[in-house]
Amino acid sequence: MTPTRAASRPLPVLATLLVALIAAFLTPGRASAASLQEVTGFGTNPGALRMFRYVPDGLPTGRPVVVALHGCTQNASGYGTGSGWLQLADRWGFSVVLPQQQTANNVSSCFNWFQTGDIARGQGEAASVAQMVDRQLADTSGDTSRVYVTGLSAGGAMTSVMMAAYPEKFASGGIAAGLPYGCAQAAGSPYVCMYVGATQSAKQWGDRVRAARPGFSGPWPTLVAFQGTADYTVKPVNMTDLMRQWTDVHGADQSADVSDTVAAYPHQVFRDAAGRAVVETYSITGMGHGQPVDPGSGSEQCGTAGAYVLDVNLCGAYRMGRAWGLG
């Protein structure tokens, strides 16, 4: 070992490192890695949820906020990392709110998307998540017009809840293996909803959303949805029903205006009368129940594979973020 080696490092090398560090710090839209933090006292919290958040170091004010809701048996930290949302927050410069269910509310740590008292405006878990959004916007001086909500499975179903009950708070929602708003009530059981689906017309689906926020004149959140064709926990019919529900809410028909493939998977876009994309769907051929990810360092890659986080060479979080103009 040579104790003086570090001290004798050539000055040009040190200068180059210093310039690189300064450039990284000053580059707009780039924020460094931070850590997940729990926030307490964010409101009355009628749903008794926990609030975690991720704010990249040096994040400027006026940046977007993404609310990411985990699936059953998952937690905030694991879902934030596995889905790729924390990775994208650093890459694109936005903050993430990560609600976490407690086993006292649901033994499997599922958000209670099927309980009437947790899916209505001003009540239960829906109200708790809304309070988290308000706290995050206040603390980060975030852009109130660029708040997005997304989730997997039960978290995807709760995403539908937030879009319906608090449409004024969200510009768009992103749902992976989730369910339409009011599905458990329409089917008579959450399990019938998951495994079979509910028999509703597009208008009946839309009416359920409109009833969640009476008198709301819009704009309603848009939707980006992902569903595995081999998902036997939440059957693919649920993405069809999500499409029918939200096209109806937006006054659009149920005929796709774009039908193509992305990463070899069927992809459709549904536009309203003004030509705006209001619903976008990805049917992930052969994928089971989970969040689609594409681990790696490429520009379109994100996420870390694990239980219910499935490497299918397409990162759902990246596709949502691009649709929302985050990156």
Image: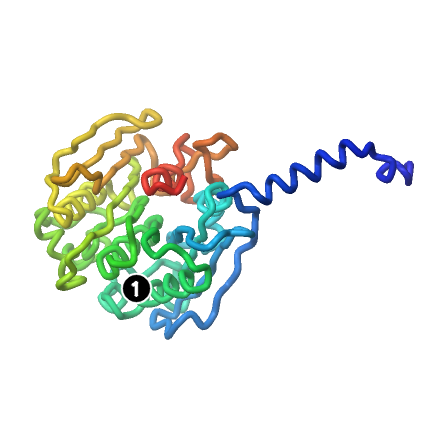
Residue pictured at 29% horizontal, 54% vertical: 170
Disc 1: which residue: 126
Q: Which percent across, then down, holds residue 221?
A: 24, 50
Front-most of residues 125 and 230: 125
The secondary element bearing badge 1 is classed as: helix
Front-most of residues 143 and 77: 143
Q: Which percent across, then down, holds residue 280?
A: 24, 38
Q: Which percent across, then down, holds residue 108?
A: 39, 59
Residue pictured at 86% horizontal, 40% vertical: 7
On the rendered structure, is 17 left or right of 58? right
Q: Vertically, is 294 above or below 209? A: above
Three-letter amino acid code at the position of disc 1: Ala
Q: Quadrant of residue 166?
A: bottom left
Front-most of residues 60 and 90: 60
Residue pictured at 67% horizontal, 37% vertical: 19
Are there few (<14), some (14-19), or many (20+) residues within 10 Å of tag 1? many
Q: Vertically, is 128 above or below 195? A: below
On the rendered structure, is 253 left or right of 135? left
Q: Which percent across, then down, holds residue 37?
A: 53, 60
Residue pictured at 22% horizontal, 39% vertical: 277
Instruction: Residue at the far bottom: name it.
Output: 44
Dividing the image into 4 quarters, which one contains the N terminus?
Answer: top right
On the rendered structure, is 149 left or right of 203? right
Q: Vertically, is 227 above or below 245? A: above
Number of marks in the rendered image = 1
Dividing the image into 4 quarters, which one contains the C terminus?
Answer: top left
